[in-house]
Amino acid sequence: MYRKLLIVAIIFSGIGYLFALSGENMAMRWILKPGTIILMIVLAATARNSAKPYKNLIIAGLFLSAIGDSFLLLSGNHWFTFGLVAFLIAHLAYVVAFVTRWRFTPIQLLALFPIMAYSYLLLRKLHEGMLLGGNAGLWMPVLIYVIVISIMIWSAVISRSWVAVAGAILFFMSDSLLAWNMFVASVSWAGYGVMISYYLAQFLLAKSIEESKRSVISYANHNSPV
């Protein structure tokens, strides 16, 4: 019952942040932007009978994301870089989490092609926009970030968790919109699009812990002597 209440709290906190965003209420934005992720951390932490390495790594990724959210609330390229680094490490935590559920088959290599194609096209436009906008100094951090989040999506694919895959793709879509709005062309609804897709992504990644719970139970049943 309490987990259902947590999900309701997450939904209302996320919606509250969207209202704070539209009203430019910085106090509420500071509370609700990382606060919504903290509620997801609680949801993840209260999942029972789950694979502990996977669960702990997802929680670490969520915690680092909350730190990144706080940095991105500050203005200036250096704070943006700090936020980028926090999210970069969060993605590495997610990658390691997915690797703990490695279920690789050669056919999964095909998933690399659309991921690489999209990443290449996005990076090409971002590079052009950053050069024109005088943000060339951010190119290398952005390049590394896109490479890592691309690896994160593919590692979700090889974990065969479609909840995690959906979360990873939504995360990339959120970051793509954020970067496009910053460096290529202004998008009027970007703030809302970024946060809605971001919160959905993180929620799905947190919920993917429950799939690791089912895997643990299945493994235990398979190896039971009875």
Image (cartoon, grey):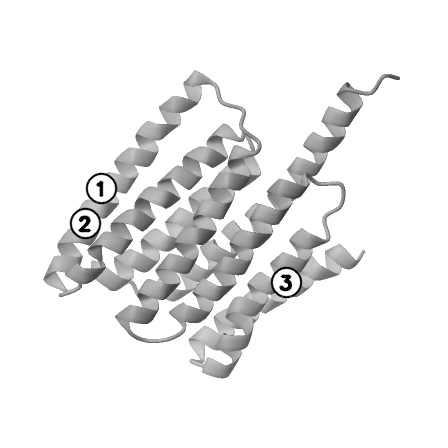
The spot of residue 35 in percent (x, y) is 57, 69
Say left or right for 85 vs 157: left
The residue indicated by pointer 2 is 125
Q: Amino acid at mark 3?
A: Leu
The spot of residue 9 in percent (x, y) is 67, 65
Whether the residues at callouts 3 and 2 have beta carbons within 8 Å, the answer is no
Residue toward you, 1 or 94: 94
Secondary structure under badge 1?
helix
Residue found at x 53% / y 67%:
34
The residue indicated by pointer 3 is 39
The spot of residue 118 in percent (x, y) is 29, 39
Give the quarter of the image for residue 135. bottom left
As measured in the structure, the alpha-carbon distance from the residue carrying label 2 to the one carrying label 1 is 6 Å
Whether the residues at callouts 2 and 1 have beta carbons within 8 Å, the answer is yes
The residue indicated by pointer 1 is 121
Residue found at x 62% / y 58%:
41
Residue toward you, 79 or 191: 79
Residue 138 visible in the picture: yes
Q: Amino acid at mark 2?
A: Lys
The spot of residue 3 in percent (x, y) is 74, 55
Q: Amino acid at mark 1?
A: Leu
